[in-house]
């Protein structure tokens, strides 16, 4: 009896040894409605124990579409062990010209250049940055505006040798530097009595006339300076993201069929049922043989007792 129990235990151990190991649970799978992402490159180790799938995704791509299921390839079973994320900078650059406008109180070039640095950092409307250089041949200075001022001007005229203090001999207006001045006042001076051949000519007068008027002049209120800066502007745009899916490879047992290039193999019950059937048949045969042997032994013991 003990011998029979030992044989049954051995049969049970054989059955467990022949049964295939269940596949490990997959990593989180992509949602059903997620668009599948395709790798830009695949890197495999020489011994096949590690395989990396590299995905370069744009802003419109959903990383949930990266396949995470186990797959078989070239005799290895691959299981996802890690999914890494890495930002990929993209450098964008171009030539750019920037026009600056500023105000100056003076128009001389020394004063103007003091307001314009040789190099200046600029940021474009779309976010590109660069140090641009002043182009001296583009510097222009124009009046920014005009003002006016009015002031009083005056002039004096002397009219000598007048016989009397009579204003009829004095002009009421005069021209001075293009302006018309009006007689404002007269100062009289008496000359010494002049004689000619001993005859008295009487008193003579000199009129000192003052003329006044107004003068309006215009002036520049300031100057507008324009200049151009040129150079290269650039930026680093984080428009793409790299994902690296790392899979660990395990050699597939020779008894299991190899499915190459299968991304998400379905679990086949035949892998389990067929070996179990074989084991069951073998177990049934062993059990039957043990039962017949046991009966023969029991019959022999009964004959011996009789």
Image: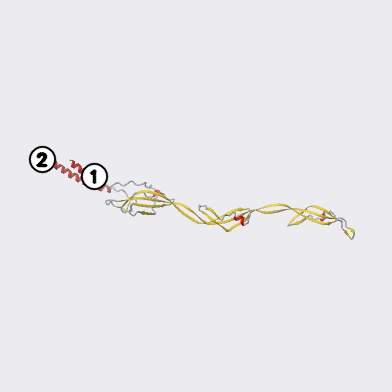
The residue tagged with tag 1: helix, strand or loop? helix
145 relative to 271 in the view: left or right: right
| Mark 1 burial class by Cα count in 10 Å: few <14, some 14-19, many 20+ | few
* Residue positioned 14% across, 42% down in the render: 297
User: Extreme bottom residue here?
Assistant: 197
* Residue positioned 20% across, 42% down in the render: 6
Q: Quadrant of the N terminus?
A: top left
User: Extreme right residue here?
Assistant: 198
Q: Is residue 127 above or below residue 197?
A: above
For the residues bearing labels 2 and 1, Cβ distance under 8 angstroms: no
Residue named by callout 2: 304
The residue tagged with tag 2: helix, strand or loop? helix
Residue named by callout 1: 13
* Residue positioned 10% across, 40% down in the render: 304
Q: In the depicted view, which residue is nearer to us: 176 or 248?
A: 248
241 relative to 5 in the view: left or right: right
263 relative to 6 in the view: left or right: right
Gap in Å between the C-alphas at discs 2 and 1? Answer: 36 Å
User: First in sequence: mark 2 or mark 1?
Assistant: 1
Q: Quadrant of the C terminus?
A: top left
| Mark 2 burial class by Cα count in 10 Å: few <14, some 14-19, many 20+ | few
């Amino acid at each position: 009896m003990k011998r029979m129990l030992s044989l049954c235990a051995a049969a049970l151990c054989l059955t467990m040894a022949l049964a295939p190991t269940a596949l490990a649970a997959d990593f989180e799978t992509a949602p059903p409605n997620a668009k599948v992402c395709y790798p830009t490159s695949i890197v495999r180790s020489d011994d096949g124990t590690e395989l990396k799938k590299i995905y370069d995704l744009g802003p419109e791509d959903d990383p949930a579409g990266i396949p995470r299921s186990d797959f078989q390839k070239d005799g290895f079973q691959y299981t996802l062990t890690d999914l890494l994320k890495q930002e990929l900078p993209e450098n964008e650059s171009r030539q750019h010209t920037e026009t600056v406008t500023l105000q100056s109180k003076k128009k001389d070039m020394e004063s103007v250049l003091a307001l314009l640095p040789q190099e200046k950092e600029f940021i474009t409307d779309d976010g590109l940055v660069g140090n641009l250089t002043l182009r001296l041949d583009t510097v222009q200075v124009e009046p920014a505006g005009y003002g006016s001022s009015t002031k009083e001007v005056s002039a004096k005229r002397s009219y000598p040798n007048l016989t009397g203090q009579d204003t009829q001999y004095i002009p009421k207006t005069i021209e001075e530097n293009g302006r018309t001045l009006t007689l404002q006042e007269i100062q009289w001076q008496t000359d010494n009595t002049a004689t000619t051949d001993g005859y008295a000519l009487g008193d003579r007068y000199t009129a000192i006339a003052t003329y006044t008027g107004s003068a309006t002049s215009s002036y520049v209120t300031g100057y507008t300076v324009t200049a151009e800066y040129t150079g290269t502007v650039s930026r680093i745009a984080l428009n793409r993201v790299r994902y690296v899916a790392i899979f660990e490879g395990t050699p597939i047992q020779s008894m299991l069929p190899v499915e190459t290039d299968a991304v998400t193999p379905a679990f086949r019950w035949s892998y389990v049922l067929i070996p179990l059937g074989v084991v069951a048949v073998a177990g049934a045969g062993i059990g039957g043989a043990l039962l017949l042997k046991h009966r023969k032994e029991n019959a022999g013991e009964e004959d011996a007792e009789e």
